[in-house]
Image: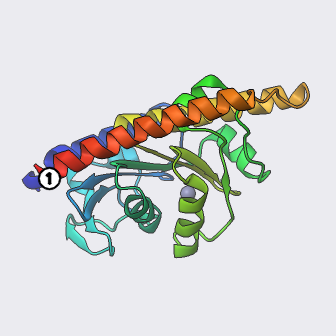
Amino acid sequence: MSEWLEERRRVLLTAQQLLEKRLTVGSSGNVSQRVGAELLAITPNRRYTEDLTPADIVIATFEGDVVDGDGIPSSELMLHVGVYQARPEVQAVIHAHPRYVSAVAMTGRPIPPILEDQMIYLGGQIEVAAHAMSGSDELAAAAVLALGERNACLLANHGALAVGRDLRAALYACEYLEKLCLAFLWASLLGDPDVLPPEVVETEQAFFRMMQRTESELVGARIRR
Ligand SMILES: [Zn+2]
């Protein structure tokens, strides 16, 4: 286990923070980190986070074969793999069932660009992936499509998907998404929330894309070294 001990510790810590921040409940939700080119460290299937040790974090291939660890990888493994294959710069993926995300996700309504931190940290309008069975390839494909180049999306009648250049960024993306859903719900009680002006959206999305490209190049340089 020692070869991937640091990655396992970080994945476990993030899973614990997800629970402490009340972004998920019980054994639901899953956390992963990319390990090298085609491996990931991922939380095990249906285990309570408070019972886990670093040794329980599973090292698996993108095909789902366990390379190291006694546990079974999360049933949402293909959701994580789908993102890593579509987004080379992404280093960490979190899937969770936060309460306000859950409320918006069951309406199927995307969240238009309404908040500055939504633009800066999540990358624009939040799309909703079409409903598909948990753990299915169909869910992974729908989620990758809804995520696009942004850092978060909703999964219809299900929950949240958040990604980042590392586990901390993915965790904060999940937290920003939950805060955005709360604000969206409250604002919707007062009427339709005001959407940011189109020129602001365009400028901020261009800036977000530039930052993503920079991160992608940095990751590429790290892999080449
Ligand atoms: Zn789920």
Residue extending farthest right: 191
Q: Residue at x 54, y 36 (%)?
A: 206
Quadrant of the frame with the N terminus: bottom left
- Relative image position of residue 190 (x, y in whole percent): 90, 24
Residue 191 placement, left or right of 5: right
Residue at the image position 60 percent from the left and 42 percent from the top = 98
Does 199 sit above or below residue 214?
Answer: above
Quadrant containing ligand 1: bottom right
Which residue in the structure is indicated by mark 1?
224
Quarter assignment of residue 139 = bottom right
Rendering coords of residue 92 (x, y %): 36, 47
For ligand 1, tell me if the residue under mark 1 lies within 8 Å: no
In screen coordinates, is 195 left or right of 94? right
Q: Image check: 105 left or right of 41?
A: right
Percent coordinates x, y for residue 94 in the rendering: 45, 48
Confirm whether residue 212 shows in the render. Answer: yes
Q: Secondary structure at mark 1?
A: helix
Residue 130: quadrant of the picture: bottom right
Q: Position of residue 174 (x, y in %)?
A: 52, 38
At a point 24% along the width and 50% down the height, the residue shown is: 220
The residue closer to the viewer here, 117 or 4, is: 117
* Mark 1 residue type: Arg
Q: Is residue 169 left or right of residue 109?
A: left
Is the residue 154 above or below the residue 23 in the image? below
Residue placed at 44% from the left, 59% from the top?
83
* Within-10-Å neighbours for mark 1: few <14, some 14–19, many 20+: few
User: Does the image show residue 166?
Assistant: no
